[in-house]
Image: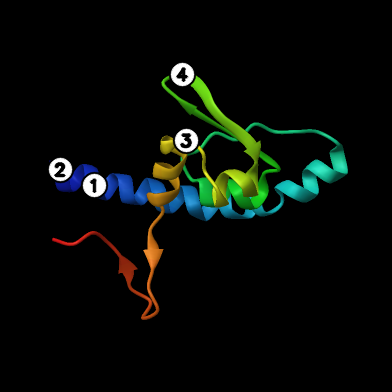
C-alpha cells in the first residue's frame, strides 16, 4: 500500500509541475499587464523567490518572517524559513542529488 501511495504522489507532483510551470512562468507578465496581485501558497521557497516580490513565512498559524523575496531566500531570519530553504534538493558538481548520509 505504501508503494502505491508513493507512486500516486509521484504522479501528482509530476502533473502539478507539468501544468504549473507554464502558468507560473507567465505570472510576472500577467501581474504587470493587469496591475493585479496574487497570493501563492507553497513550501517551495526556491520557486516563490523567483516569481514573487515579497514572501511571508507562516509557522504555527502566525507570520514569523516577511520581507523581500531575495532577502528571505538569501538571509532567512527564522529557523522555519531556513528549514524550508534547506529542504530544497541540491545537485552536486557531478549532477547527482545531494542527500544526507546513510
Q: Earlier in the sequence, mark 3 or mark 1?
A: 1
Task: Name the side, left or right, on which 25 lies relative to 2.
Answer: right
According to the picture, the residue beneath numbered tag 4 turns out to be: 61
Give whichever of 96, 16 is nearer the camera.
96
Q: Quadrant of the C terminus?
A: bottom left
Q: CA distance from mark 1 to mark 4?
A: 28 Å
Q: CA distance from mark 2 to mark 3?
A: 34 Å
The label on residue 78 is 3
Specify the quadrant of the image occupied by residue 32.
top right
Q: Where 79 falls versus 74 (above or below)? A: above
Residues packed near mark 1 inside 10 Å, few (<14), some (14 to 19) or many (20 plus) = few
**Which residue is at 25% across, 50% downward?**
7
Q: Label 4 neighbourhood size at 10 Å, few (<14), some (14-19), many (20+)?
A: few
Q: Which badge, 1 or 4, is on the more N-terminal residue? A: 1
Would you say the residues marked 2 and 1 are in contact, meaning their CB atoms lie under 8 Å apart? yes
Q: Which residue is mark 1?
A: 6
- Displayed quadrant of residue 99: bottom left
Please name the residue shown 56% across and 52% down the image.
74
- Residue picked out by circle 2: 2
User: Label 3 to label 1, Cα distance in Å?
Assistant: 31 Å
Residue beneath the point at 40% across and 48% down: 13
Does residue 97 sit above or below 25 in this rendering? below
Residue 4 in the image: x percent, y percent? 19, 45
Q: Give how far across and how far down residue 79 sits, in percent.
A: 41, 37
- Residue 20, percent across and down? 56, 49
Amino acid at each position: 500500500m505504501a508503494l502505491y501511495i508513493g507512486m500516486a504522489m509521484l504522479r501528482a507532483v509530476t502533473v502539478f509541475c507539468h501544468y504549473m510551470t507554464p502558468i507560473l512562468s507567465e505570472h510576472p507578465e500577467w501581474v504587470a499587464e493587469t496591475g493585479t496581485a496574487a497570493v501563492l501558497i507553497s513550501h517551495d521557497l526556491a520557486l516563490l523567490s523567483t516569481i514573487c516580490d515579497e514572501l511571508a513565512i507562516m509557522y504555527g498559524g502566525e507570520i514569523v518572517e516577511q520581507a523581500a523575496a531575495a532577502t528571505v531566500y538569501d538571509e532567512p531570519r527564522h529557523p522555519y524559513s531556513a528549514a524550508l530553504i534547506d529542504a530544497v534538493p541540491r545537485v552536486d558538481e557531478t549532477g547527482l542529488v545531494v542527500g544526507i548520509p546513510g
